[in-house]
C-alpha cells in the first residue's frame, strides 16, 4: 500500500483527479470504477475543471459505479445516480451508453447483478477503482461480514452506515436499508486502486485497513492483498498511522 499524506481536502481532490486524468490520457478507453459519498466530490469537481480546460477527454471512457441504494428512483437527490450526474456525468463528454450504475429495482436482482459483473469482465475489468472508506471499514457497500461476498449483490446496510449516511436524506426514515454493491471480486481485480480518506471519523478505519488483521469483518483490510493501492489521506484520517508508514505529499 502506497500511503500519501496530503495537506487537506483540496490537495486530496487535486491529486486524485490528477491520477484519473493521467490514466485517461494514457488510455482513452480506460475503465473506471467510481465511488460516491462526500469524499470524492472535490475530485469530480476538479475532473470537470480539467475537462473544461480541454486537458482530458472522457468520450471513450467506460464507468462502473460501486453501488446504489435499493428502491430509490433516479430522480431522488439521495440516489447515487442523481449524485453522479450532478457532480460529474452532466458536465463531461462521457457517452451515456458507457455509464453503468447498479440501479436495479424490479425483476431478478441476482440476474441483474450477474450481468453487471459480466459486463465488467467483458470490457476487460477495471483499470482504476476509486474508493472511499466507511467508518466501519466498508468499501463500496461491502459491509463487515463473516463471509466474503465476491459478486455484485444486494446488501442490508449496517446500522452504522444508516446512521452515518442518513445525513444525505431529508429524514433518517427516508434512507433505504438496502443497497446493491459491487462485490469484492471486481474491486480486488481492478488493476489499480485509489482510496480517498478525509477527516478524523475515518482514522480508526484507516488504521485497521493498513495495520489490522485481514478479515471480511474489516472489508478494507483486504486491500492489503492488492498489489497496487494508493491511499490519499489527510492528517486527520491518517492520525493513527505510525510516522514513517506514509509519504508526505509534495503538493
Ligand atoms: C460510495 C461508497 C462508500 C463510501 C463510504 C464513505 O459509493 O462506496 O463506500 O465511499 O461510505 O463515504 P463518505 O465519502 O461520504 O464518507
Image (cartoon, helix red, strand yellow):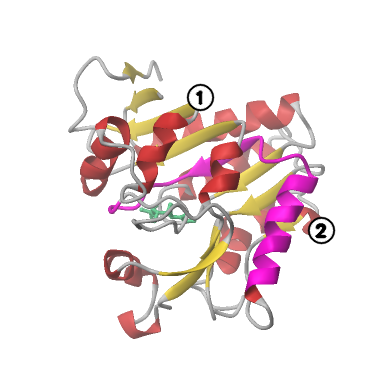
Q: Is residue 219 left or right of residue 243?
A: right
Residue under the point 54% across and 52% down = 150
Quadrant assignment, res 220 = top left
The label shown at residue 241 is none
158 lies above or below 134:
below
Label 2, ligand 1: CB separation under 8 Å: no
- Of badges 1 and 2, the one in the foreground is 1
- Residue in front for this viewpoint, 33 or 178: 178
- Residue in front for this viewpoint, 43 or 120: 120
- Element type where label 1 sits in the image: loop
Asked if residue 79 can be seen in this view, the reply is yes
Q: Looking at the figure, which quarter contains the C terminus?
A: top left
Query: Residue 127: within the magenta?
Result: yes
Label 1, ligand 1: CB separation under 8 Å: no
Q: Which residue is mark 2?
A: 97
User: Residue 94, how many percent across, how many down?
Assistant: 76, 50
Query: Residue 50: within the magenta?
Result: no
User: Residue 218, how many percent across, how many down?
Assistant: 32, 47
Asked if residue 46 can be seen in this view, the reply is no
- Element type where label 2 sits in the image: helix
Q: Quick check: marks 1 and 2 in contact, CB under 8 Å?
A: no
User: Residue 130, how many percent across, how many down?
Assistant: 53, 42
176 lies above or below 159:
below
Residue range of the region highlighted in magenta in the rendering:
110-136
Between the residue at mark 1 and the residue at mark 2, the CA separation in whole angstroms equals 31 Å
Q: Looking at the figure, which quarter contains the N terminus?
A: top left
Q: Quadrant of ligand 1?
A: bottom left
Residue under the point 65% across and 42% down = 32
Q: Which residue is mark 1?
A: 227
User: Residue 36, how many percent across, how many down?
Assistant: 50, 55
Q: Earlier in the sequence, mark 1 or mark 2?
A: 2
Amino acid at each position: 500500500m502506497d500511503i500519501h499524506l496530503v495537506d487537506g481536502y483540496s490537495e486530496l481532490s487535486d491529486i486524485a483527479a490528477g491520477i484519473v486524468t493521467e490514466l485517461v490520457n494514457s488510455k482513452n478507453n480506460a475503465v473506471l470504477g467510481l465511488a460516491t459519498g462526500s469524499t470524492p466530490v472535490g475530485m469530480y469537481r476538479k475532473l470537470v475543471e480539467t475537462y473544461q480546460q480541454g486537458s482530458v477527454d472522457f468520450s471513450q471512457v467506460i464507468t462502473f459505479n460501486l453501488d446504489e441504494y435499493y428502491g430509490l428512483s433516479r430522480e431522488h437527490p439521495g440516489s447515487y445516480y442523481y449524485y453522479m450526474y450532478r457532480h460529474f456525468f452532466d458536465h463531461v463528454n462521457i457517452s451515456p451508453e458507457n455509464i453503468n450504475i447498479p440501479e436495479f429495482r424490479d425483476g431478478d436482482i441476482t440476474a441483474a447483478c450477474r450481468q453487471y459483473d459480466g459486463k465488467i469482465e467483458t470490457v476487460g475489468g477495471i483499470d482504476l477503482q476509486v474508493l472511499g472508506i466507511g467508518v466501519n471499514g466498508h468499501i463500496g457497500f461491502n459491509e463487515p461480514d463473516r463471509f466474503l461476498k465476491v459478486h455484485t449483490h444486494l446488501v442490508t446496510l449496517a446500522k452504522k452506515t444508516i446512521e452515518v449516511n442518513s445525513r444525505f436524506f431529508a429524514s433518517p426514515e427516508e434512507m433505504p436499508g438496502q443497497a446493491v454493491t459491487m462485490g469484492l471480486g471486481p474491486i480486488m481485480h481492478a488493476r489499480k486502486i485509489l482510496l480517498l480518506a478525509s477527516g478524523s471519523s475515518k482514522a480508526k478505519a484507516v488504521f485497521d485497513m493498513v495495520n489490522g488483521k485481514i478479515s471480511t469483518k474489516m472489508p478494507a483490510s483486504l486491500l492489503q492483498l492488492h498489489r497496487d493501492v494508493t491511499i490519499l489521506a489527510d492528517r486527520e484520517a491518517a492520525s493513527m498511522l505510525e510516522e514513517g508508514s506514509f509519504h508526505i505529499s509534495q503538493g
